[in-house]
Every structure is written in C-alpha cells, then in structure tokens.
Image (cartoon, grey):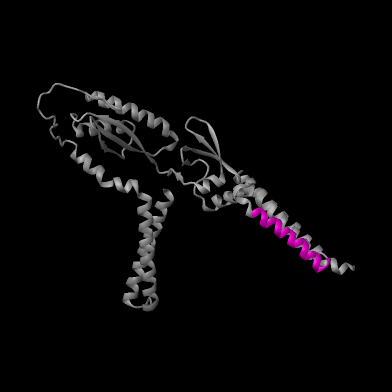
Amino acid sequence: MSIVEFYPLISVTGISLLLLSILEWTFRRKIAKDPSNKYYRQLTINLFIVLVVIALIAASPISGELKGQILGLIGIVISGAIALSSTSLLGNTLAGIMLKITRNFKSGDFISVNDITGKVASRTLLNIEVQTFDRGLIFLPNIYLVTHPVKVFPKSGVFVSVEVSLGYDVPRHLVEQATLAAAKLNDIDSAYLEVKKLLDFSVLYSLNALVTNLDSYVTVKSKLHADVIDQLHLQKIEIVSPNFMNTRAIGDAAVIPQAKRENQDIEEAIADNIDDLLFDKANYSDTLEVLQQKRQRIESLLAKEGGESSRGQRLTNKLETIENAIIKVKRELERL
C-alpha cells in the first residue's frame, strides 16, 4: 500500500481531533455555567466516538467487502441496543434527552408524579432526584417520567385546600367570613370558599388559597389550617370534622339560618377572577393563538393591498397593535 491510500484516514483523524477539541472547549464553558451539563457532555462524546469509528473504518485502506462486514456488524449492535432501549440504560438516556429538549420542568420546580410530590433537586441523563415534604430523597428513572403524567406546579403559585365540615345550622356566609379572614392573616389575597359536598349531618367546605411563594408552601399550608381553626372558634362556630352526629331536642322547628349578605361585595369580587386564576395559562395560550390567527389574516390582506393606500396604512397600524399584544401575552406566559 502507498501512503496516498492513507490520506483519507489521516484527514478523518485530523478533523476528528479538531472537532473533539471544539466539543471539549464548548462543554467546559457550559459546565462552568451549569454543572448538570457534564452528563450531556459524556453522552455527546460517546456518540461522537461512535461516529468517528465509523468514519475511520470507511476511510481506512481496506477492501470494500471487509468494510461492509465491519459496518454491518456495527449497525446490528446499534440496532439491537435501540431495540432493547425501553427497559435498559439506553432507554433512560433517551428519555433524559427527551425531557431536556421538552424542558417540561427544571431543578427547583415542584412536581407530582402519581403519589410522589416534591421539589426537583437534580437531573441527570438517567434519573431525577426529588426531595419530598418529609425531606427524603426519591430517585425516579427518566423513563418513568416519560411514561407517567407529570404535574408541574407553576412558579406563579399553587392553590392550597383546607377542608372543614360544619353543621347545617351554621350560616354559610359566616363560615366564608371566618375562612377568608384566615387567608388574610397569611397575606393571601386570592382565596375563595367552595361548598364541596352536602353530607348527611354536615356541610363540607374547602378554602382554596393561592400560595405564591412555593418555597414556604408547607409552612403556609400548616399555618393556614391553624388559622382556620382559630377564626372559626373566634366566631363561636362548632367544627364537626370529619363526621359528627349532633342530636339536639329542637322540636319540629326547621333549622334554617337567616341569610346574611354583609360579605356580598367580597364574594362577588372574588368570583369575578377565580376562573382567571385557575386557568390563567390556558387563557393566555388561547388568547395568543387567536392573536396569531388575526396577524396571519392581516398579513395576507396587507400583501394583497399594499402599504401605500389608506386601507394599507390602517392594516399596518392594526398589525403593529396585534404584534405588541402578542409580545405582552408571551411575556405573561413566560412569567407563568
């Protein structure tokens, strides 16, 4: 063999070493900003090495028949690994890549998977580490997260529910006044009382309060429960949770509390924005889709009309207004 036949192999080797140096330099910078990138560095380097091996075989001065056999063997090995990926190490790696690309959640987010709820402590290519409310650490394989629904608590806040059952002889508006006062004591402005169920001997109420600081979620939830008890007791309201049969000799008189509407203004003000609070992201997404459709129609009309005419100027101004609205909605979605 002459040295000329080795030129392709030498060229591939040189280019591979250059690309490897660039990859190492790039990942060193990324790891300095985010240490979790070290796991993706290892995967990328491994994939790069596989590609380099294939390129070196293709560029080597050996017979075409032998090249075909070697490349065929490599293809069979890779195909077998992918076929077994659903339950193997490679399966978790592929799932980790998918989770990284979709960016459904990140470290520091509160998530819930089946009966596991906690804060994401770290993420790797193989699993994630979740710290639960009892300070324990649970490691979940990435493939488990891909095959099960994951609920992510938004940074803008999450509703905490406090359930309490009270007798039918307690006026509903008095209960609402006491529970909303408990929310106010915790600096919670977005709260509402839900009549959840009418039981045989009591009414099940649920105070839903928006906790915006998830870092103090457990503290606020505990204090909110305590304040609900205190406020109900201050109002001389008897708590019959979870179930309490209260037998009293009251004759044939019906126990129907008189309606009190002192809190009607508060009730109506809260009712106006409950759905917006519960489904804010869905509403913003829907608004964004509508605005984008309007923008597309106006751009189509503007292309036919031209921007010089008076109608074209009006369309241009309207398009600018819609663009500003789209930017504003996108900012709100990013905030959520």
Q: Note whether 7 is above or below 79 in the view shown.
A: below
Residue 174: where, in percent of width, then height?
20, 31
Q: Work out which residue is located at the far top of the displayed protein and give it.
A: 249
Decide which of 216, 94 is in the foreground and name it: 94
Q: In this view, does 319 lie to the left or right of 42?
A: left
Is residue 233 among the parts visible in the rendering?
A: yes
Residue 82: where, in percent of width, then height?
64, 54
Please check the rendered image and state whether residue 301 is part of the magenta-colored stretch, yes or no. no
Q: Is the magenta stretch mostly helix, strand or loop?
A: helix
**Residue 254 picture quarter:** top left
Decide which of 104, 295 is in the foreground and name it: 104
Decide which of 196, 323 is in the foreground and name it: 196
* Residue under the image location 38 percent in, 75 percent down: 307
Residue 59: where, in percent of width, then height?
79, 65
Q: Work out which residue is located at the far left of the displayed protein and give it.
A: 252
Residue 284: where, in percent of width, then height?
37, 54
* Residue under the image location 14 percent in, 35 percent down: 259
Q: Please state the extent of the stretch shown in magenta in the rendering.
A: 61-82
**Residue 199 picture quarter:** top left
Quick one: quadrant of the N terminus? bottom right
Q: Work out which residue is located at the far right of the displayed protein and give it.
A: 1
Please check the rendered image and state whether residue 64 is part of the magenta-colored stretch, yes or no. yes
Is residue 123 among the parts visible in the rendering?
A: no
Q: Note whether 241 is above or below 87 in the view shown.
A: above
* Residue under the image location 56 percent in, 45 percent down: 142
